[in-house]
Amino acid sequence: MHVPVMLGECLEYLAIRPDGIFLDATAGLGGHSGAIAAQLTSGFVIANDRDAESLALAKSNTVEYADRIRYHQGSFVALREALTANGVKQVDGLLADLGVSRYQLTEPARGFSLMADGPLDMRMDRSQGQTAEELVNFTSEKELADLIYQFGEERRSRKIARAIVRARPISTTGRLARVVEEAVPRTTRLHPATQTFMALRLAVNDEQGELDGLLQAAPDLVRTGGRIVIVSFMSLEDRKVKQSFQALARAGRATMLTKHVVRPTPEEIRDNPPSRSAKLRAVEMR
């Protein structure tokens, strides 16, 4: 079952108005979008996602609120198009949950999971872009090591990159996971390839570039008095969100609503373990 992360906190910081217009920039499977729509009367929520397959599932998961949800496929850098397509200049609140959806992680054919064998794809939008297989097989050893170190924060990146290059060609997630596991021993409960898989996913989908685009666009998409709420899962992302929000506050464009990062409750972590690394930050536009 899909469980949206920090749902109560997201709704609280968005300060939902029944007649408001909201943008869920990462609709995923529709958990947050449906919950926002449930609180609306004359307003609506624009449910945006770059993954067409996730968006199709979101539609079926939120069918009871279909009259209050407008679906749009697009990346962060094209969020203005999502508003324009719905005749909107600014919204009352923008939410972005930067985590990977459960569907992407558990569907082997998508190539995100190291726990189930599948094609080494990892693209959120399967209609375009380089696959993880192409990245793994045609990137130089040094570039691969740098990528795994920078995006995965993996200290053993050089050893892993060397093992990957020696094992080429690699075409499945299972094969890649085994190559990494053989190169670096397991030292924690986490699979040794976890950070490598995360790094490849970030690179394939240009997630850092996309986040930069979101942080640049969001302040102009939200009206005065509107809220921006972002949930991140990696220190790399949280750092960018924090610095962007602080810059908005210093420039007098926004008020910080979260003096310190907000984390999920112990109860939520117990009931929904994937939420354990979530970090929420929010601002109100001036």
Image (cartoon, helix red, strand yellow):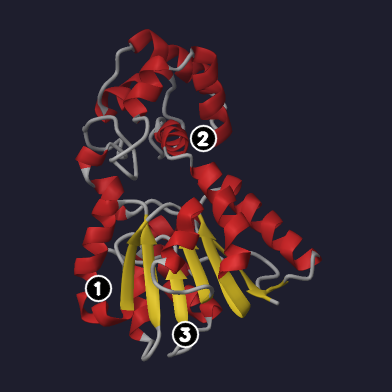
Look at label 2 and name its amino acid. Answer: Gly
User: Which corner quadrant holds the N terminus?
Assistant: bottom left
**Mark whose residue sits in front, 1 or 2:** 1
For mark 3, does the 10 Å Cα neighbourhood hold few (<14), some (14 to 19), or many (20 or more) residues?
A: some
Nearest to viewer (mark 2 / mark 3): 3
State the separation of the CA atoms marked 2 and 3.
Answer: 38 Å
Q: Which residue is mark 2?
A: 152
Q: Earlier in the sequence, mark 3 or mark 1?
A: 3
- Spot the residue most to the top: 166
The percent position of residue 11, horizontal first and vertical second, equals: 47, 78
Percent coordinates x, y for residue 135 in the rendering: 40, 24
Image height check: is 103 above or below 6?
Answer: above
Q: Amino acid at mark 3?
A: Gly
Classify residue 274 by image quadrant.
bottom left
Question: Residue 201 appears at what percent x and percent y?
Answer: 41, 37
What residue is shown with label 3? 20
Q: Secondary structure at mark 2?
A: helix
Q: Is residue 176 visible?
A: yes
Asked whether the viewer can see residue 6, the reply is no
Q: Which residue is mark 1?
A: 62
Res. 254 image quadrant = bottom right
Q: Is residue 161 left or right of residue 116?
A: right
Is residue 279 toward the left or the right of residue 270 in the image? right
In the rendered view, would you say 223 is above or below 249?
below
> Which part of the image, by quadrant, shows the C terminus?
bottom right
Task: Work out whether mark 2 precedes mark 3 in sequence or the reverse, and give the earlier one.
Answer: 3
Q: CA distance from mark 1 to mark 2?
A: 34 Å
User: Which element type, helix, strand or loop, lies under badge 3?
Assistant: loop
Q: Are marks 1 and 2 in contact (CB under 8 Å)?
A: no
Q: Which mark is residue 101?
A: none
For badge 1, the amino acid type reads: Thr
